[in-house]
Image (cartoon, helix red, strand yellow):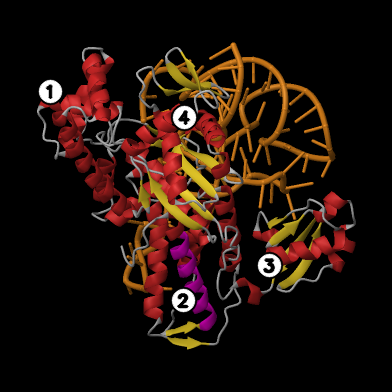
Amino acid sequence: MIRERIEEQIRAVVGDVPFVVARADSVAHGDYYTNAALVTKTDPKALAEKLKVEGVEQIEVAGKFINFYLSREALIPAEQKIPQQYAGKTIMVEYTSPNLFKPLHIGNLIGNILGESIARLLEKSGADVKRVNYPSDIGLTVAKGVWGLTQTKGDPSDIVALGEAYKTGHAAYEDGSAKVQIDEINTALYENSNPKWSELRTEGVATSRKHLSELCKTLGTTFDKEFFESESGLLGAGIVRESIGTVFEESEGAVVYRGAHTRVFLNSRGLPTYEAKEVGLFDLKSKAYPDFDTSLTVTGGEQKDFFAVVFDAIKKIFPDRTAGKNLQHISNGFLKLTNGKMSSRLGNVITGESLLADLTVAARGREDVAVGAIKYTVLKSGSGKDIIFDPERSLSLEGDSGPYLQYALVRARALLRKASGATVTQFITPQSKTLERILIHYPEVVERAARELEPHHLTTFLTELAAEFNSWYAAERVIVDGTIAGYTLSLVKVVERTLSQGLNLLGIPTPEEM
RNA sequence: GCGCCCGUAGCUCAAUGGAUAGAGUACUUGGCUUCGAACCAAGGGGUUGGGGGUUCGACUCCCUCCGGGCGCACCA
């Protein structure tokens, strides 16, 4: 990247001091600027005169800053090479991880969308990414569903009936009317001691998984590995028991870990809690991918402190397997609705499927456009932030939106199709270079998004690019009398490639037409 | 009570300690017999929650107050 060449040049003159070379805030200030003269308290003119960078056509002193203007040849690179900052690294990304038996709600979608985009950014940056899903197929949630099925007599192969059963069980547990029975079912399911309940669980889990995999297919996710709580629970419980006295201690009949705060790993009935299941999960994950460098876990932000303590405990249990490795939790925000107008077949919880169905109708029957819309909404702001979802506005699909980006891409592709039959001339249009001057920053935006694990940087960039392309498109006539300028043709090609690749990194579908 | 996160235009969101804080949306107006109008052009809209501090420079860092969210022992 040219930015790195500028940095090296400056460093050669002023030494290793913390200056920045960054994208200028407006095209009036060049393509890059540096504050190197300011932070080193040297004369900007003297510094500027010492700099000579390949691809930079003009170096301008503007008060405290030095601005760099790239030459035209440097503006359209033959290929947009993404820095391979994760080359040689194996990174597990765990995301989606829903409760089976419970209808998949929009919250599950957010984790999937964020996790998938992070996985793609890491892959593009050289990492060997392992996508991991960790569905909950046992525990209190499932016990509530199984109890519910015994009451409603619902068909466990019907996803709607499962949702109803869970609601029935949850309500009865909360008001205390069936707490004892549901706890009993919970224990029985772990021990596999009641064939009837175990069978209901097995059938319900299969139904939920089928729907989960269909939804993931629609969203563009394929997991490398799935681990289940039914595996991790007993495994984790065993590991925790072996570490009583060293890592864990017994307290009030439970087995706890005292870290930043105290957490229960085995409850007083001896059953593994979520915490112990994480211990078992780590055992499974680290055996499946022993050479991993980083393990990312994407879940709701409310679990942040929980994971800080659990990772702490895991490092103490497995010092050899965690040495030099990075265990990191990534928060996704909550989804909040401005009103409850969205239709839902499962009561007041908006399911992932009903949301997609409603959006697809708004997108004139196009599911890929609907997927683009919801993904854009999730990926346009910083990852941990709550997402305020206004159903009516989200259904409009205009302006700052997934379909806006898709539309710009579709236009570029239509243009290229038409240009394939046109005569290419050598004429170079000398007009505005704004589009080129945005394009040049694509690799560094991807680099930053991948480094910070923040896809929204890319979303913002692509929106800016699409807006400039649309604006340019409206002002310029590209194909005139069956001819197109060679320079313009390559410009449109780079726009198409960049939008297409960028949308792909966000997990947003890239339609040929719409 | 302790801890973490958040507060930017009416609304939804950007902004790597740097130049005049930017988009979209909503509202007003204009543009399709011309490469795709899910588009484009123009307009108004701000004490970045309040106050103090650090800095050549603060939406960004520190302190404090106000407002909101989340977590803190047997749910996940």
The mark found on residue A47 in the picture is none
Q: Are marks 4 and 3 on the same chain?
A: yes
- The one nearer the camera, B3 or A459, is B3
Residue A180 position (above or below residue A448): above
Tags 1 and 3 both on a single chain: yes
Q: Nearer the viewer, mark 4 or mark 2?
A: 4
Quarter that holds the C terminus of chain A: bottom left
Residue type beneath disc 2: Val
Above or below residue A68? Residue A301 is: above
Q: Is residue A249 magenta?
A: no
Quadrant containing the N terminus of chain A in the rendered view: bottom right
Q: Decide: marks 3, 2 in contact (CB < 8 A)? A: no
In the picture, residue A63 is in which quadrant? bottom right
Report crowding for label 2: few under 14, some 14 to 19, many 20 or more residues within 10 A (C-alpha). some
Instruction: Determine the CA span between mark 1 and mark 4.
Output: 39 Å
- Please tell me whether mark 3 sits on a helix, a strand or a loop: helix
Q: Can you tell which of label 1 and label 4 is closer to the viewer? A: 4
Q: Earlier in the sequence, mark 4 or mark 3?
A: 3
Q: Which residues are magenta?
A: A486-502
Q: Which residue is mark 2?
A: A478
Give amino acid for label 4: Glu
Residue A242 tag number:
4
User: Mark number for residue A2?
Assistant: 3
Are discs 2 and 1 located on one and the same chain? yes
User: Which secondary structure, mark 4?
Assistant: helix
Circles 1 and 4: CB atoms closer than 8 Å: no
